[in-house]
Image (tube, rainbow, N blue to C red):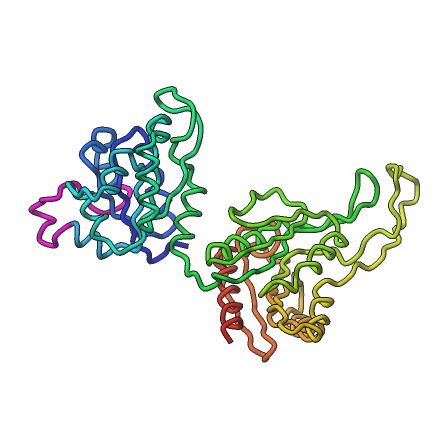
Amino acid sequence: MLQGKTIVLGVSGGIAVYKAVELLRLLTKAGAEVHVVMTRSAREFVTPLTFQTLSGHPVHTDLFSLSQEQEIGHISLADRANLFILAPATANLVGKIAQGIADDLLTTSVMATQAPVLVVPAMNSNMYLHPATQANLQRLTGYGYHLVEPACGRMACDAQGPGRLPEWPVVREAVLTVLASRDLAGRRVLVTAGPTHEPLDPVRYLGNRSSGRMGFALAATARRRGAEVIMISGPSSLPDPPGVTIIRVNSATEMASEVLARAETCDAVVKAAAVSDFRPSHFSTTKIKKAEGGLTLELTANLDILKTLGERKADCASPPILVGFAAETGELLDEGRRKLHDKNLDLLAFNDVSADDAGFAVETNRIIILDRDGGEEQLPLLDKEQAADRIWNRVVKLLDE
């Protein structure tokens, strides 16, 4: 997700410097080229050699370096960055930048950059909550800097409260949000995710293997791109995407009710949920006992939510862009084109769920996107967040048209 991005990681002096080492490792693992700037006090906690080894680049430390100043070091760093990350950002560093003090390589580089700046504070709880620190952080957000709230917990100094450096998933989400295009700003989108569970008795249900990963990825990437996101999800153990309005449902009937009540207020609807086609015709209020000779179930068809949305388009003055998903096996293209036409969709994304590296319960997907004009786009094997971004690219193009 960060391939081709150049990040300057500014490290100031606090005990959380050791966590910045892991942050650097994960940023480079995600594909970013990372250049590290360390303050004098940061070097008291971890040596520059550690950061140099992990980044593959010399660590920048001195404002007036004979080896670096031929490029004017702070200007060179400022110009090459797609993003500055200050982690840990101590109270001292926050205060200096907020007051316009530029007396070392890190503060001068931050002052000189036009790149977005992500501030990740880490300090003693009392220092973080001090009115001066809070005022300085507010001033930085007023400058347009982006702030990641610190985590709460026990500190190295044995204090308890806010001030811990956030874990990687929180920082990663902030980084991706800052770097994302805002081409969905002002748009409201609805995404469905996960399976549905059709109750058979108090302990059993009919369902499928969907984990919800594709739908959750679509919701997260849309929010990063500025959209107001409503996600209607069936049962899933995945963590909630930040900033997304989440409505939890269990059955296909519940999902249909929630989707149909909200779809017409949205600019786009992406139906990534694996909704059960059938439900048991009868629900047993007591557990069905094991019996000789097996069990015959009578099933009733559930409402086809996607087809219903397609039929409603004719009665809507400004219908939402409608994107369907199809998990298929066998002849994919013919079945995909049939569904696209029959359900009156704008786009259909489908994949072969019989493949080991795509479909249900894996981190990757290999999707083919069909459009109503007969176009076909075959995506390579991608992380589901990358695949989601490619789908949103198509939606944005349709919205702009």
Q: Is the magenta stretch mostly helix, strand or loop?
A: loop
Going 63% across and 56% down the picture, which residue do you hit? 192
Q: Position of residue 251 (x, y in %)?
A: 75, 50
Q: Position of residue 168 (x, y in %)?
A: 42, 40
Answer with left or right where residue 382 lies relative to residue 258. Answer: left
Residue 273 visible in rendering: yes
The residue sitting at the right extreme is 292
Q: Is residue 324 magenta?
A: no
Going 33% across and 58% down the picture, which residue do you hit? 4
Instruction: Read off the magenta span.
Output: 52-73
Residue 334 visible in rendering: no
Answer with left or right where residue 277 lies relative to residue 23. Answer: right
> Total number of numbered labels?
0
Residue 369 sits above or below residue 223 on the image = below
Q: Position of residue 288 (x, y in %)?
A: 88, 39
Instruction: Assign the N terminus to one quadrant of the image.
Output: bottom left
Q: Which of 282 and 335 is in front in this view?
A: 282
Answer with left or right where residue 57 lies relative to residue 262. Answer: left
Q: Where is residue 34 in the image (x, y as percent from the top left)?
A: 28, 48
Q: Is residue 59 magenta?
A: yes
Going 63% across and 71% down the picture, which residue do you hit? 319
The residue sitting at the bottom extreme is 373
Residue 311 sits above or below residue 164 on the image = below
